[in-house]
């Protein structure tokens, strides 16, 4: 089947991991996949699927609008034949769907997260998000994809959409790229890491304070941060003051995987908000595949099950620093290796992309049968 996917994700960016993994999975299922999205700084010609780069404004607030216009123009000019289904990211769906509907092409909405920003633009993004799911509610778009069961409930509480029309695609991980190495010795103290958006509303500014307190309490620790965002410059300034802190700009996935393989603990500082409570953090899967213990804020979006895992410690936000220090102060180092192995095994059992690819394939098959 010929599948097109219009995405706001820049291929090569950490945020595009899901798009790449699902696209490659669909190809292995026998589909032909073409992804239309922003221009990429990386060469994607070796991918098993086709990547078409679209022009996009660099101005915040106009990125999704300009990309949607470019996608509409491309479809008008090329009018590809034998299109079986089109996947649309929610950020551009309301502007692209009317044209595709006129072509008679069935569509699937892809929602990897409602608006996470807290700026003025977020209010505009929420309006766009609601417009996109309204298209599923009125069956202009026949199926929608979310990241968790709580995310699905979040949708159904706000729109009249049957659960059979919503498909849950949790964040997975490339188990070959992110792999555990037997290097977890504490000769130089704990090594803690966070990678992803370095935005204030994600709680990342609490991480240097945590590591500083650990060191002050005699728990030798180092912190590595990877990404970009509104706190990046502030964090780089801190890096110059503290020899236990490293801040890296965003980088290719393979480089992130290499850094993670040398760490002990992956951090999840995102607070308990309506967005993070329904999330399925990609970084959590990658931490576990790398054999890392996990330390973070306690809420449903960070938990992996209803049962507490030995390799995962989640604490209420108001007690995060205090409880984290207590845990690491009392930690028995001889348990680190076995816990690391168990974290990796959990990733192998629960976070392969195979399940999400199979569910997306099911959505496509159902979509075509209904059309």
Image (cartoon, rainbow, N blue to C red):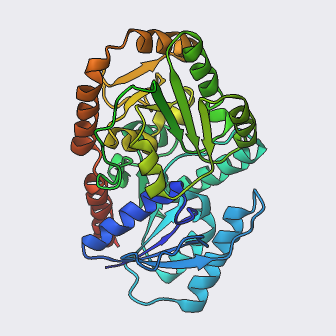
Residue found at x 57% / y 29%: 273
Q: Is 329 above or below relative to 11?
A: above
Q: State the residue in front, 50 or 247.
A: 247
Measured as percent of width and height from the top left, residue 283 is found at 45, 42
Residue found at x 60% / y 44%: 197
Q: Is 218 above or below relative to 221?
A: above
Q: State the residue in front, 205 or 65.
A: 205
Q: How many marks?
A: 0
Q: Is 34 above or below relative to 365?
A: below
Q: Which image quadrant: the C terminus?
A: bottom left
Q: Is 247 above or below relative to 186?
A: below
Residue found at x 41% / y 54%: 145
Q: Is residue 108 visible?
A: yes
Measured as percent of width and height from the top left, residue 100 is found at 52, 77
Measured as percent of width and height from the top left, residue 289 is found at 32, 43
In the image, taking residue 174 as reference, residue 273 lies left or right, namely: right
Measured as percent of width and height from the top left, residue 135 is found at 53, 59
Q: Is residue 281 visible?
A: no
In the image, taking residue 101 as reference, residue 338 lies left or right, namely: left
Q: Which image quadrant: the N terminus?
A: bottom left
Which residue is outermost to the front? 187
Residue found at x 75% / y 42%: 233
Q: State the residue in front, 99 or 211.
A: 211
In the image, taking residue 214 as reference, residue 189 lies left or right, namely: left
Q: State the residue in front, 211 or 285.
A: 211
| Quadrant of res 190 | top left
């Amino acid at each position: 089947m010929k599948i097109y996917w219009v995405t706001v994700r820049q291929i090569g960016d950490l945020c595009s991991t899901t798009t790449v993994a699902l696209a490659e999975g669909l190809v292995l299922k026998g589909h032909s996949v073409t992804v239309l999205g922003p221009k990429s700084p990386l060469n994607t010609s070796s991918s098993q699927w086709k990547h078409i780069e679209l022009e996009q404004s660099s101005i915040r607030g106009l990125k999704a609008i300009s990309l949607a216009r470019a996608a509409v123009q491309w479809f008008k000019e090329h009018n590809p034949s034998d299109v079986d289904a089109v996947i649309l990211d929610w950020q551009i769906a309301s502007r692209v769907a009317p044209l595709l509907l006129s072509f008679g092409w069935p569509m699937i909405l892809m929602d990897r997260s409602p608006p996470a920003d807290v700026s003025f633009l977020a209010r505009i993004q929420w309006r766009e998000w609601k417009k996109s799911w309204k298209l599923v509610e009125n069956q202009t778009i026949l199926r929608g994809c979310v990241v968790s069961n709580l995310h699905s409930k979040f949708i159904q509480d706000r729109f009249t959409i049957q659960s059979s029309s919503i498909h849950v695609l949790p964040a997975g991980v490339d188990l070959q790229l992110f792999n555990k190495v037997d290097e977890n010795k504490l000769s130089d103290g704990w090594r803690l890491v966070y990678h992803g958006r370095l935005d204030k509303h994600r709680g990342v500014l609490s991480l240097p304070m945590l590591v500083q307190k650990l060191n002050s309490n005699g728990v030798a620790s180092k912190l590595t941060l990877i990404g970009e965002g509104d706190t990046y410059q502030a964090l780089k300034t801190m890096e110059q003051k503290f020899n236990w802190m490293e801040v890296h700009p965003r980088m290719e996935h393979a480089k992130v995987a290499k850094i993670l393989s040398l760490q002990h603990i992956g951090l999840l500082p995102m607070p308990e908000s309506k967005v993070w409570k329904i999330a399925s953090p990609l970084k959590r899967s990658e931490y576990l595949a790398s054999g890392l213990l996990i330390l973070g804020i306690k809420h449903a979006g960070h938990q992996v099950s209803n049962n507490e895992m030995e390799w995962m410690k989640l604490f209420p936000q108001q007690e995060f620093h205090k409880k984290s220090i207590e845990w690491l102060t009392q930690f028995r180092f001889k348990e680190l290796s076995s816990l690391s192995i168990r974290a990796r095994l959990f990733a192998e059992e629960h976070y392969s992309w195979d399940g999400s690819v199979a569910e997306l394939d099911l959505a496509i098959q159902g979509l075509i049968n209904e059309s």
